[in-house]
Amino acid sequence: MEQAVAQQANLFSGTLPSIEWIDELIDIVNSSESARMNFAAKVEENMSKTEASSVLAVGIGLYILGREGEAIEKLQKCDDCKEKCLYLAFAQRRLLRYDEAIENLDKAAKFGLEMLRFNLEKAATYRSAGELGAAADQLKKCANFKGVSADYHYHLGRLAEIMGDYEKETENYEKAIELSPDHQEALFHLAYRCDMCGEEDAAIDYYKRVASTRPAHCNSLLNLAVLYEDAREYGRALQCVHKVLQYHPNHQRAILFKKDIESSRTMYYDEEKEKRRTRKSQILETPISDFELSVRSRNCLKKMNIHTLGDLLNITEVELLSYKNFGETSLREIKQILETKSLRLGQSIEESTMPADYEEEADKPEDGTLSKTVEELQLSVRAKKCLSKLNIRTIGELTRRTEAELLGCKNFGVTSLNEIKKAITSYGLSLRTLE
């Protein structure tokens, strides 16, 4: 705490500290609610001062506090210098005023901003603006820092991420971490990529590394808690959430998440039912090749792209018989195999059939909303993973589910439900309701 107070006081001491020092200050201010409150008080204390150094320091302080509009107003009153232009650019970038941000970054470079920092921040601004070609061109200007700068490789990773080149993304994050083992941003994004790819063990390892750095990284701790909860390690999940609340007692996401975890700990788990479900899944995944079938039947099924017992549950007798060379003899063979497993043709179709009056054509959005992927809803990691487990890929598929169906997914709580309802409401949609 003493270090934090000293750092905050130095910003207003009369001589502006270095940009690297201010980077450290930003981490310290955001390390806890108390540190943030103390810093806010210090900014207010200096707000009325008219000395040039005080006005600049206050402008930077307002940016650190997330008060971008006030920061821009204050900084514009200062004499031009690299610090003024850099933090003006940062504030404008947060407000999506990208052209102005680029203009001020160019000015900062003219006033002596270090060239690597200039190129990386300019690339980040282009990336945020969706100008990926311009971002790539800007990063090419830093190519001589390949294998030298962790920040350079981190920004290469971020660009690859948004372009969908996940192999290149991972490669650059790993290089950044090799060059700087405590690089929080690279560790976090690599953890997130592993999480999205289903590599839970690797994700946990990277999130733990971020969470072990100072100050504590809230998003890493909460994402780590999600993974622990998914693994039913509720004690560890709560430890992560408690650590967030230790420094940020009013963190709303952590408060709600804590309630979800505590509910999950007391949730009844039917072990026998889970075993039956697992056995059924194993049966449905049984390859057709494991059964003795005639050559004609085997060839027909292969051409129809039917490879497992589960595939047979998604096709009807009529559809099979309509296929060329597939006759009554082949049909009997198939039905006998399914009967030995207490299954039948078309079973999955019957089980998933919706009431005919569920969705009237006139109620469907005409802008293609239902065909959009759920990725466009910008959901949290937990909500995304639950939808993935339920095999929900599009917004249309999501709206065909009820609240009860979503809540029935393990580790899917009220917080995630409310998040999803809010997201689809913005499209004028809602979850299905049962009369």
Image: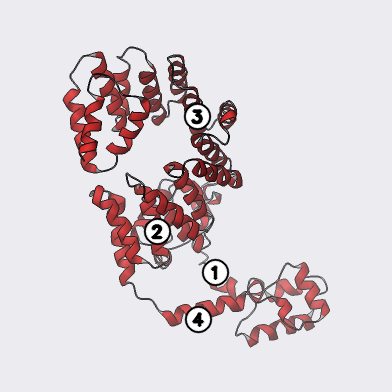
Look at discs 1 and 2 and give the one toward the viewer. 2
Cα separation between marks 1 and 2:
33 Å
* Corner quadrant of residue 290: bottom right
In terms of depth relative to the viewer, which is nearer, 149 or 257? 149
Q: Mark 1, residues whose alpha carbon is within 10 Å: few (<14), some, or many (≥20)?
A: few
Closer to the chain start, of discs 4 and 3, is: 3
Above or below: residue 292 compared with residue 242: below
- Label whose residue precedes the other's in the sequence (1 or 3): 3
Tag shown at residue 353: 1
The image shows residue 74 at horizontal and vertical percentages of 28, 19
Are the residues at dot 1 and dot 3 in contact (C-beta closer than 8 Å)? no
Type of the residue with mark 3: Leu
Image quarter of the C terminus: bottom left
Badge 3 marks a residue whose secondary structure is helix
- The disc, 1 or 2, on the residue closer to the chain's N-terminal end is 2
The three-letter code of the residue at mark 1 reads Thr
Mark 2 or mark 3, whichever is nearer to me: 3
Q: Secondary structure at mark 4?
A: helix
Q: Measure how far apart labels 4 and 3 are at the Cα level.
A: 54 Å
| Quarter of the figure with residue 113 | top left
The three-letter amino acid code for the residue at tag 4 is Arg
Q: CA distance from mark 2 to mark 4?
A: 26 Å
* Amino acid type, mark 2: Val
Tell me the tag on residue 226: 2
Residue position for label 4: 276
Q: For the N terminus, give its image quadrant.
A: top left
Q: Are marks 4 and 1 in contact (CB under 8 Å)?
A: no
Spatial separation of the CA atoms under disc 2 and disc 3 = 32 Å
**Can you identify the residue that label 3 sits on?**
120
Percent of width and height locating residue 38: 19, 35
